[in-house]
Image: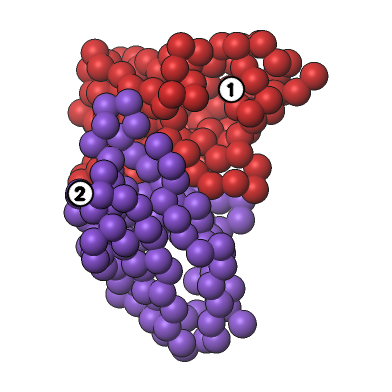
Amino acid sequence: QSALTQPASVSGSPGQSITISCTGTSSDVGSYNLVSWYQQHPGKAPKLMIYEVSKRPSGVSNRFSGSKSGNTASLTISGLQAEDEADYYCCSYAGSSTFPYVFGTGTKVTVL
Amino acid sequence: EVQLVESGGGLVQPGGSLRLSCAASGFTFSSYWMHWVRQAPGKGLVWVSRINSDGSSTSYADSVKGRFTISRDNAKNTLYLQMNSLRAEDTAVYYCAMVTRSESFDYWGQGTLVTVSS
């Protein structure tokens, strides 16, 4: 099972909006509305930011939003803030009992 | 408050074994599927294994199948990962994680580092 494809890096100035793409296949992203996004600061555990493509867990800022079209999911961060600088990973349910989850390659977000 | 605390990582020689533990608290451990996810240094997240709530069903990534065994003790609220025949490519931070809804990893431990090197 190949990792989902994300851009290696995305940058933006404070207050701007950025979008991170996550491209999979018809066997994972394209088949299930079960894409999640995780934020990871250096040396820290990942934190769930989006689940079921576009839903936010309690406590996650509404500056974070998700969407999906075909085999590609996207995470948009609006009103970029310094604390948003981190690595972001998408993840899709893939349905297989032997490899049920596939993560993305990861994107480093830099706040200029 | 949900807490997941991993332990058991360390330096081990190629071919060696290690058992990781994940102590859970703040929720009804026996009700949830649990997972191990790893992250090699400077690399991305990779799903490793999962176990259902009563321990009767398990799944593994192909890269660890036959070498790693996931298990749980619901009486002790603890998840385990027995790792045998370790290879250099198993070097990673290992996280235990819990899925509570919609196939997303809602809670993560802080991770424990496993280094396989001679």
Give the color of chain B as drawn.
red
Q: Amino acid at mark 1?
A: Gly
Of residues A112 and B110, the one nearer the viewer is A112
Q: Looking at this rendering, what residue extends furthest in the right direction?
A: B118
Of residues B70 and B21, the one nearer the viewer is B70
Determine the secondary structure under disc 2. loop
Image color mode = by chain
Number of the label disc, if any, that sits on residue B8: 1
Q: Position of residue A102 (x, y in %)?
A: 38, 42
Q: Amino acid at mark 2?
A: Ser
Residue A61 in view (yes/no):
no
**What residue is rendered at 34% in x and 44% in y?**
B105
**What residue is rendered at 26% in x and 31% in y?**
A96
Give the color of chain A as drawn.
purple
**Disc 2 chain ID:** A
Determine which quarter of the picture holds residue B77.
top left
In this view, B90 is above or below B39: above
Number of the label disc, if any, that sits on residue B56: none
Check the picture and name the quadrant holding the C terminus of chain B: top right
Determine which quarter of the picture holds residue A23.
bottom left
Number of the label disc, if any, that sits on residue A31: 2
> Is residue A58 rendered to the left or right of residue B11?
left
Of residues A23 and A87, the one nearer the viewer is A23
**What residue is rendered at 20% in x and 28% in y?**
B31
Check the picture and name the quadrant holding the N terminus of chain B: top left
Of residues B25 and A7, the one nearer the viewer is A7
Point out the frontmost of discs 2 and 1. Answer: 2
Q: Position of residue A107 (x, y in %)?
A: 52, 62
